[in-house]
Image (spheres, rainbow, N blue to C red):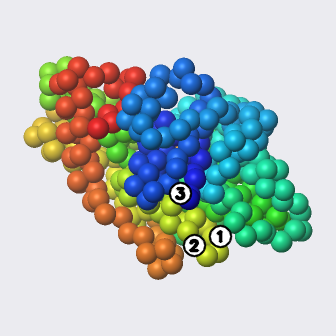
Amino acid sequence: MARRALITGITGQDGSYLAEHLLDQGYEVWGLARGQANPRVSRMRKLLSDVQVVRGDLLDQGSLISAVERVQPDEVYNLGAISFVPMSWEQAELTAEVTGMGVLRMLEAIRVCSGVSRGAAAASGQIRFYQASSSEMFGQVTETPQNERTAFHPRSPYGVAKAYGHFLTQNYRESYGMYAVSGILFNHESPRRGAEFVTRKVSLGVARIKLGQATELRLGNLEARRDWGYAGDYVKAMHLMLQAATPEDYVIGTGRMKSVRELVEAAFSAAGLDWERYVVTDQTLHRPAEVDLLCADPKKARTQLGWEPRVAFDELVAMMVESDLRLLTDGGDPDQDSSWP
């Protein structure tokens, strides 16, 4: 029989790529959604028709138990979160509840449905759990590059909530013998990224300027440096983590840093434009507590999982700009939908 996977955050960038990858691997894929009438669920059904949907909410413990009981998954991928970092200051409590406590509720749902108790030996064939941790947990970094042993110093409510979920996943692994792992993923982007994220804001801004729909692009800190990769590559690492013989946590990234300025240069260059004619820096767009640089050390994933990123930075940026040019030319609404192929 086909293996069965349950994905929270199925309508987001990572959820869609992961669902596609698992379907290609022969899985039966289920997505957790708060309501069937959600327009993003309707769009997902059209593009991923083989994905089945089960009702559930990371704010509601009972709904998660019901979902796990109904689906009977072999693997659970917890990608659901309030994931836009600037919003986490505006909605700090909700971020804590969904991004942090949501991990606890899902782990408890798996534990309850599996009949796991403290001190009991892990059963063979148990549900395997993946937690989407984040490089934002490193925050004000203590060393560069960052690896699985680097200390955390989160600089946002989002980063704090992710750190809580990360340590909780470790705790359930150590306390209950559950197969529970965290992937500490560095920034990963695609044409499906939400319009509020800086990479997509840049690609959309470039497309609008190229098409004569805008005359400037306002951005915050151009000197912040990140390790950017392609989301389609990174979901393959998630899957590989749950196939390993023993549950361990992994850092996933390219090991190369680029500044926001370099992102802007690459995006405008892909459209044949001079970025300095159009970009305006805006102090109001800076974070209250900035994370200046993040760079992954993915050696462990490379040596133990055989994982390597495939799409280079310039290729990724050009892909996003070209996709948004097509979207806007065809009259699409980037504020409602990510640019799904």
Count of picture labels: 3
Q: Would residue 134 appear left or right of 26 to someone viewing this image?
A: right
Q: Nearer the viewer, residue 136 or 60?
A: 60
Disc 2 to disc 1, C-alpha distance: 7 Å
At label 3, the amino acid type is Ala
Q: Position of residue 327 (x, y in %)?
A: 24, 29
Q: Relative to 206, say whether 189 is above or below.
A: below
* Residue name at image x 44 percent, y 32 percent: 45
Farthest residue, direction front:
1
Read off the residue under disc 3.
Answer: 2
Circles 2 and 1 in contact, beta carbons < 8 Å = yes
* Residue name at image x 47 percent, y 79 percent: 303
At label 2, the amino acid type is Ala
Q: Position of residue 141 (x, y in %)?
A: 56, 60
Q: Nearer the viewer, residue 287 or 305?
A: 305
Circles 2 and 3 in contact, beta carbons < 8 Å = no
Task: Name the secondary structure under disc 3.
Answer: loop
Q: Position of residue 83 (x, y in %)?
A: 54, 39
Badge 3: how crowded within 10 Å, few (<14), some, or many (20+)? few
Read off the residue under disc 2.
Answer: 244
Along the polypeptide, which appears first: circle 1 or circle 3?
3
Task: Name the secondary structure under disc 2.
Answer: loop
| Res 233 quadrant in image | bottom left
Q: Name the quadrant of the N terminus.
A: bottom right
Along the polypeptide, which appears first: circle 2 or circle 3?
3
| Res 124 quadrant in image | bottom right
Can you see residue 197?
no
Q: Position of residue 24 (x, y in %)?
A: 40, 55
Read off the residue under disc 1.
Answer: 247
